[in-house]
Image (cartoon, helix red, strand yellow):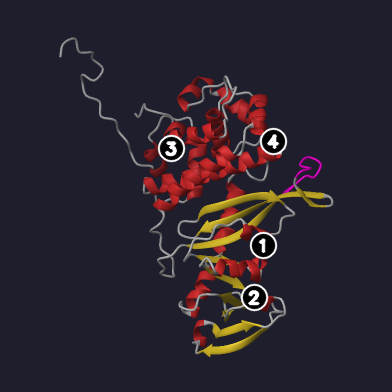
């Protein structure tokens, strides 16, 4: 029988905690803290994400029930609801945002060889946002509508491995297209977006970086066709054109040629028109790239269903952002474990298994693979040696 570390400790061992402490020092997170450190706060919140805790009281009750195991989990401070609530309220959320970015860098390196249907050497990103509805009276800082509050998670997803590389949390009023101003484009990379990001001034800035974009055209697009390429209509393509914008404003904001591709989706019985500044890829590959954009929709659906980002443990802006970034860290950590242990099961299955085995002293690999693990015990293993 395995008698080593707790499953929770084995999960946390995959975190670069020395780099976590650098993030804490950067923002003086432990300044004047005596008992409940930023590490304790992070571990308690990570425990809540892994075990689907609903509230601070729920976290307190579960951890106090396992009080004898807290030290072995790495938690040194006394777990109390008010202490954790105060930590979420006052300790800078940027500590956990920076640490999540470090984990994202590790995960991207592990998933860099993940295949796409389009064979590209450059990175491919999908940009989109999702809205989490809140109560306006409880979250007055997250203004959205007259009688409604919300936060938006603006996310840039690396399509190789579905790892978020950029997340910006705002109130619900911030329009999606404004996030293009926050991005630092990766030259040569592909950015796949829907029509909400169709702003020709910002797209031209992306083009000058130089980076490539693939987006949907609006029905009122004003343009002049310069050239048409032959297409195979059996693939769903309807046209592949080089165009020039003719609108009084759009022609000034984007003064160069664009590529317009029309595609008919048989499965959904829908016709889509794409705009891109890439003239080297085939038209069907451009359509495939946009098809991969749906991975970010699946990512949003997944994190809303399996992580605690729809119900928050605090009402302040700092507490909400802290919880979101720690949730992202847990998601990326599970993705790292899946790759390092070469697991075939899904992230959902890993989370479900961890949620009920977190206090066990079983081998993490055995728990996640259901392999038999036997510890070799020699006859004199427990016998102390008097002489060597």
In this view of the protein, which residue sits in the foreground, 20 or 298?
A: 20
- Image spot of residue 57 (x, y percent): 66, 29
Give the residue at x 51% y 22%.
76
In this view of the protein, which residue sits in the foreground, 293 or 220?
A: 220
In this view of the protein, which residue sits in the foreground, 241 or 237?
A: 241
Gap between marks 1 and 4 measured at Cα: 29 Å
> Is residue 252 placed above or below 371 in the rendered structure?
below
Gap between marks 2 and 4 measured at Cα: 40 Å
Q: Nearer the viewer, mark 1 or mark 4?
A: 1
Q: Image quarter for residue 194? A: bottom right
Indicate which disc, 1 or 2, sits on the residue closer to the N terminus: 1
Q: Residue 350: in sight, yes or no?
A: no
Main secondary structure found in the magenta portion: loop
> Is residue 102 placed above or below 388 in the rendered structure?
below
What label does residue 314 carry, if any?
Answer: 4
Per the image, the residue denoted by label 1 is: 177
What label does residue 225 carry, if any?
Answer: none
Gap between marks 3 and 4 measured at Cα: 27 Å
For the residue carrying disc 2, how many other residues have a C-alpha within 10 Å: few (<14), some (14-19), or many (20+)? some
- 206 part of magenta stretch: no
Indicate which disc, 1 or 4, sits on the residue closer to the N terminus: 1
What label does residue 16 carry, if any?
Answer: 3
Gap between marks 2 and 3 measured at Cα: 44 Å
Badge 4 marks a residue whose secondary structure is: loop
Per the image, the residue denoted by label 2 is: 217
Q: What span is in magenta?
A: 133-141
Badge 3 marks a residue whose secondary structure is: loop
Q: Image quarter for residue 263? A: bottom right
Indicate which disc, 2 or 4, sits on the residue closer to the N terminus: 2
Is 86 left, or right, of 331 in this rendering? Answer: right
Q: Residue 89: in sight, yes or no?
A: yes
Q: Nearer the viewer, mark 1 or mark 2?
A: 1
């Amino acid at each position: 029988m395995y008698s080593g570390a707790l499953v929770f400790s084995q999960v946390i061992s995959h975190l670069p905690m020395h780099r976590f402490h650098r993030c804490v020092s950067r923002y003086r997170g432990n300044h004047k803290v005596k008992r409940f450190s930023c590490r304790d706060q992070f571990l308690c919140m990570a425990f809540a994400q892994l075990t689907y805790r609903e509230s601070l009281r729920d976290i307190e009750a579960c951890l106090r029930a396992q009080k004898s195991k807290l030290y072995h989990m790495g938690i040194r401070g006394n777990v109390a609801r008010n202490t954790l609530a105060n930590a979420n309220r006052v300790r800078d959320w940027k500590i956990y945002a920076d640490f999540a970015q470090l984990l994202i860098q590790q995960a991207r390196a592990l998933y860099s060889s993940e295949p796409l249907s389009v064979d590209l050497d450059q990175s491919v990103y999908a940009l989109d946002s999702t809205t989490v509805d809140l109560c306006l009276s409880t979250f007055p800082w997250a203004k959205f509508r007259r009688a409604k509050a919300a936060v938006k998670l603006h996310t840039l997803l690396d399509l190789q491995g579905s790892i978020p590389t950029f997340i910006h949390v705002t109130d619900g009023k911030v329009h999606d297209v404004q996030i293009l101003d926050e991005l630092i484009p990766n030259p040569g990379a592909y950015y796949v977006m829907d029509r909400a990001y169709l702003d020709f001034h910002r797209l031209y800035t992306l083009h000058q970086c130089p980076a490539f974009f693939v987006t949907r055209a609006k029905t009122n697009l004003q343009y002049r066709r310069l050239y048409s390429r032959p297409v195979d209509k059996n693939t769903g393509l309807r046209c592949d054109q080089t165009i020039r914008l003719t609108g009084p404003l759009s022609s000034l904001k984007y003064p160069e040629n664009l590529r317009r591709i029309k595609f008919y989706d048989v499965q959904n019985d829908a016709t889509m028109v794409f705009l891109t500044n890439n003239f080297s890829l085939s038209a069907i590959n451009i359509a495939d790239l946009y098809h991969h954009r749906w991975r970010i929709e699946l990512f949003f659906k997944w994190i809303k269903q399996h992580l605690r980002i729809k119900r928050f443990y605090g009402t302040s802006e700092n507490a909400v952002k802290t919880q979101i970034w720690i949730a992202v860290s847990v998601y990326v950590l599970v993705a790292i474990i899946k790759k390092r242990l070469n697991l075939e099961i899904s992230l959902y299955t890993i989370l479900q298994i961890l949620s009920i085995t977190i206090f066990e002293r079983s081998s993490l690999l055995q728990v996640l693979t259901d392999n038999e693990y036997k510890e070799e015990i020699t006859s004199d293993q427990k016998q102390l040696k008097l002489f060597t």
